[in-house]
Image (tube, coloured by chain):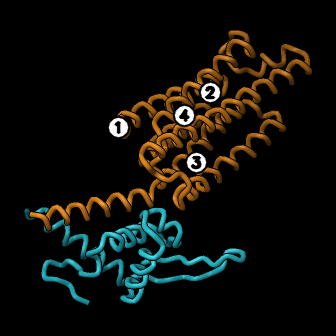
Amino acid sequence: MRVEISGLNKLFENRVRLGIMSVLTVNDSYDFNNLKAALGVTDGNLASHLKALEENNLIRVNKRFIGRKPNTSYSITETGAQLFRTHLKALEDIIRSQ
Amino acid sequence: MDNNTNYSEDLKVIKKVMEESSRFLSLSGLSGLFAGLIAFAGATVVYLVILKNKILLTEEYFTGVTEKESRILKTELIAVLALVLILAIVVSLYFSYRKSLRKDLKMWTPVSKRLLISMLIPLVTGGIFIIILYIQNQWMLVVPAMLLFYGLALVNASKFTYSEVFYLGLIEILTGLLCTIFPVYGLVFWCFGFGLLHIGYGLTMYRKYEG
């Protein structure tokens, strides 16, 4: 995983990923449909970014059934929370230093 | 520098998404304002029609009449209070719905569900408690109980909406405790707690976030 000298993380360069990480930072868990509504993105777009974050162990996937309907919810991992905090701090530092 | 505006845009997005997904921001100041006005209207009806220009809620007032009349009066009193509650809820929902449309926010989200549950637990408990008080003829404590449980509900729900709701809740609890000490002034405390406080809160919030 590449972290630049500034502290910015390449993984978070995308707005959708920033959005996902933001939602999961302030919520214990969030399901796919609600994430989609919160961020206003399409199924495919959201799914691909979730996959990338999951593969990098930044978020955790919980699949279960509510009645007969499958429900997929996501939560942030310890690593994810830490890296996102670092990224946020780097963003703030850059803006403050201008 | 282009990159720089991107970074500050990033931060704005993060802040917005965090706020919108953890707090119910559709709650409109106008909801508070109109809930307050409705509470005043209810108190006016109680004062003019039921208590016939008496301000004090005393046991004597209801014992000076026949058993049947006293029961009718108390039922009317409860009916007005319930009507006020229902109207206030409907009006609050209406203005919140309007605000959510205007600000392009969603009403029914995980956070609004949590807000609802955290409000309903103290409110339903309070509601049942009040029904029991009424059945056991402890009706002098009905208004204090309404203020207390409503205040507790606000404090409990405040973490899912504007933080000002927390302070409104604290003042409602304080008003409820004072009202427990002086229950004969129930109508006055009602006007203050459900009327004046809501109007003050509503106007402040409207000017701060929607003006």
Q: Amino acid at mark 2?
A: Phe
Residue position for label 3: B153
Residue position for label 1: B208
Badge 4 and badge 2 in a common chain: yes
Q: Farthest residue to the top: give it.
A: B53
Residue position for label 4: B175
Chain for disc number 2: B
Dot placed on the residue nearer the N-terminal end, 2 or 1: 2
Which label sits in the foreground, 1 or 4?
Answer: 1
Determine the residue positioned at 77% across, 22% down. B59
Q: Label 1: few (<14), some or many (≥20) within 10 Å?
A: few
In the rendered image of the structure, the colour used to display chain A is: cyan
In the rendered image of the structure, the colour used to display chain B is: orange
Determine the residue positioned at 81% across, 21% down. B73
Which label sits in the foreground, 2 or 3?
Answer: 3
Q: Label 2 to label 3, Cα distance in Å?
A: 22 Å
> Which percent across, then down, holds residue B151?
56, 42
* Local secondary structure at mark 3: helix
Which label sits in the foreground, 1 or 3?
Answer: 1
Left or right, B115 with reference to B139: left
Q: Amino acid at mark 1?
A: Lys
Chain for disc number 4: B
Badge 1 and badge 4 in a common chain: yes
Q: Residue A62 sits in which quadrant?
A: bottom right
Dot placed on the residue nearer the N-terminal end, 3 or 4: 3
Left or right, B102 with reference to A33: left
Q: Residue A46 sits in which quadrant?
A: bottom left
Q: Nearer the viewer, residue B33 or B78?
A: B33
Q: Amino acid at mark 4?
A: Thr
